[in-house]
């Protein structure tokens, strides 16, 4: 479904990615692991079109997308839930969700908002509140819900566990898994919390200083000595 | 005290410079002055609204806001000379000018503002100051070499509303007298506010414009064309400012310095309202307009400021309000994420 081939990218003089290649097949949850600054978020930014790669290519459903604008990539079916959530803090929960469906022209948007509320019932109670007034966990749920409103085929999730209590993290991962199973949504998941990420995913990549250092089945990565020492902490 | 009354008694001021009798003795004069203040305040507010629309979407203070309106109004003058402003022509010209202002705003954003986007704020400030000089120069070059225009037409809306305006002209609630044009200024300002309110709160485009103003990165991720939204924001601001110019031209005379007499108060109004609040801009404009009018009419105890000091007094009120509410009446507290 998604094929990233030999992608390099940099922020000014600082090279963030070197020849990164990875593949995501339909219906899977793929984990992208690595330390701070390893290039996880940069990889997602290249895919969603916010960061122009200096080399390599990105293909989605057989089409090259690395020269497209973020707007057109959203309409192709890739939703990016960015690091730090990036909600519209002064707009209401409902307005945030409507903006998630900005590229859509159909009439099912209202119904989809209700569907998001069934996944995240806490949001339903806060429908008319500004997003900035929500708790950290609720904000993450809203960010994911907003991403889902575009009806994506592929969801890019950047650090959904960041700064959240363990029980909330568990809840959010549970919902991601449910949506993946029930709707066949494909997910590319960036995480520092490797334990959690490898529990829900089928396959994983490990990034180190901008390069792919390791790629294997999730179960295999969990057994891998160096992954365990560096990312799992046991 | 004795000395002071002595002084005011011996100074032979012309009649118009004398303070009016207090409001409780002449309520009609008081309310008439308030209505006149509402009208001039509405114009300050419209120009301020343009400043606010640009500031909240691009963080740029557009010092050329007044001169852009001046250019459009002068084009309007040429159209009036060519077509005549009678009957439906006034509205034809009015809407041509709106379209022209929109195009001008969009063009300015595209060509000179976009390159300094993301540069230090001062760069954008210098660019808009440059635009100020350019538009002034352009107007002077094209129009001010011959005879300056006299008598820019007022909207015919007043005469269309004959029954209403008759009633308005004679006595409003038995209290105030206002001119047709003042009444129309207030009505059009209210209409602009309602139109913007509907746009921002009830349309997808308005929602996208608000989203872009708040978080451009997230807006791009939603599939919003952020560049187009900023361009539309400038177009809208220029249109609102142009309405201010068209409405003020019949009151002040249309000349090179016309908007200078408005822009200072428009900036004051924008700051007073909170700089990022569209209703705040109008409320700020109205407060300054009304204070200015009352200060030039009444004496405060033994002190009569007169028309000369009415402007400093209006700005003094601004300073006092900012002492109490540093972010303006409707301004948000500056919250920065760390």
Image: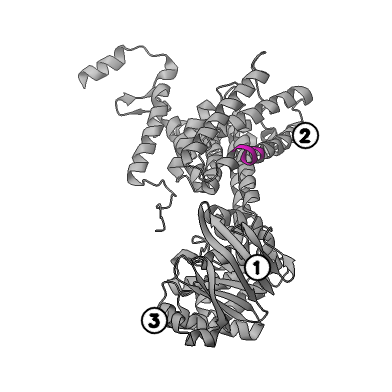
Q: Is residue B54 above or below residue B139?
A: below
Question: On the picture, is A122 further left or further right than B112?
Answer: left
- Residues marked 2 and 3 touching at CB (< 8 Å): no
Which residue: 64% across, 75% down? Answer: A23
**Mark 3 highlights which residue?**
A233
The label on residue B88 is 2
Q: Provide residue A219's location: percent of width, then percent of height.
A: 53, 88
Q: Provide residue A49's location: percent of width, then percent of height.
A: 63, 60
Nearer to us of marks 1 and 2 is: 1
Q: Main secondary structure of the magenta part?
A: helix
* SS category of the residue bearing label 2: loop
Q: Which chain carries label 1?
A: A
Bounds of the magenta span?
Answer: B107-112
Q: Badge 1, how many Cα within 10 Å: few under 14, some, many 20+?
A: some
Residue situated in front as seen by the camera: A220 or A83: A220
- Cα distance, mark 2 to mark 3? 79 Å
Q: Which chain carries label 3?
A: A
Question: On the picture, is B25 further left or further right than A118?
Answer: left
Which residue: 71% across, 67% down? Answer: A76
Question: On the picture, is B135 further left or further right than A104?
Answer: left
- From where the camera sits, is residue A53 visible? yes
The label on residue B334 is none
Q: Residue furthest left?
A: B2
């Amino acid at each position: 479904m998604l094929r990233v081939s030999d992608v390099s990218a940099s922020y000014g003089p600082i090279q963030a990615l070197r020849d990164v290649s990875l593949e995501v097949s339909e219906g899977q949850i793929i984990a992208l692991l690595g330390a701070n600054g390893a290039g996880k978020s940069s990889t997602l930014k290249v895919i969603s079109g916010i960061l122009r790669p200096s080399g390599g290519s990105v293909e989605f459903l057989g089409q090259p997308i690395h020269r497209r604008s973020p707007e057109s990539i959203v309409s192709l079916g890739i939703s990016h839930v960015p690091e730090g959530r990036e909600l519209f803090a002064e707009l209401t929960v409902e307005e945030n969700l409507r903006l998630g469906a900005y590229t859509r022209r159909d009439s099912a948007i209202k119904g989809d908002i209700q569907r998001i509320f069934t996944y995240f019932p806490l949001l339903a109670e806060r429908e008319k509140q500004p997003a900035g007034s929500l708790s950290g966990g609720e904000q993450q749920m809203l960010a994911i819900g907003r991403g889902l409103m575009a009806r994506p085929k592929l969801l890019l999730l950047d650090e959904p566990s960041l700064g959240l209590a363990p029980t909330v993290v568990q809840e959010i991962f549970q919902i991601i898994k449910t949506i993946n199973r029930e709707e066949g949504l494909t997910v590319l998941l960036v995480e520092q919390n490797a334990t959690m990420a490898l529990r829900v995913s089928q396959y994983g990549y490990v990034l180190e200083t901008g390069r792919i250092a390791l790629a294997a089945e999730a179960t295999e990565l969990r057994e891998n000595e160096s992954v365990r020492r560096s990312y799992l902490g046991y | 005290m004795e000395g002071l009354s002595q002084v005011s008694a011996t100074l032979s001021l012309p009649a118009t410079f004398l303070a009016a009798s207090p409001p409780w003795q002449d309520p009609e004069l008081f309310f008439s002055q308030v209505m006149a203040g509402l009208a001039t305040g509405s114009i300050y507010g419209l120009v301020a609204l343009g400043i606010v629309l640009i500031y909240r979407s691009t963080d740029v203070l557009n010092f050329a806001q007044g001169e852009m309106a001046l250019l459009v109004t002068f084009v309007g003058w040429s159209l009036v000379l060519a077509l005549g402003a009678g009957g439906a022509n006034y509205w034809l010209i009015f809407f041509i000018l709106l379209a022209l202002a929109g195009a001008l705003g969009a063009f300015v954003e595209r060509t000179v503002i976009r390159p300094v986007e993301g540069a230090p704020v001062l760069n954008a400030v210098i660019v808009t100051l440059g635009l100020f000089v350019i538009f002034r120069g352009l107007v002077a070059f094209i129009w001010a070499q011959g005879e300056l225009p006299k008598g820019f037409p007022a909207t015919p809306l007043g005469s269309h509303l004959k029954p209403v305006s008759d009633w308005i002209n004679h006595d409003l609630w038995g209290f105030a007298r206002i001119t047709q044009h003042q009444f129309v200024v207030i009505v059009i300002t209210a209409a602009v506010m309602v139109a913007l309110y509907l746009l921002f709160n009830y349309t997808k485009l308005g929602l996208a414009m608000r989203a872009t103003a708040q978080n451009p990165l997230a807006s791009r991720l939603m599939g919003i064309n952020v560049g187009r939204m900023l361009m539309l924001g400038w177009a809208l601001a220029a249109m609102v400012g142009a309405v201010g110019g068209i409405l003020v031209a019949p009151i002040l005379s249309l000349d090179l310095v016309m908007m200078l007499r408005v822009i200072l108060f428009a900036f004051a109004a924008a700051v007073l309202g909170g700089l990022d609040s569209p209703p705040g801009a109008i409320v700020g404009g109205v407060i300054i307009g009304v204070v200015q009018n009352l200060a030039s009419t009444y004496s405060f105890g033994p002190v009569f400021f007169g028309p000369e000091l009415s402007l400093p007094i209006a700005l003094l009120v601004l300073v006092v309000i900012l002492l109490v509410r540093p972010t303006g009446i409707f301004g948000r507290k500056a919250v920065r994420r760390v």
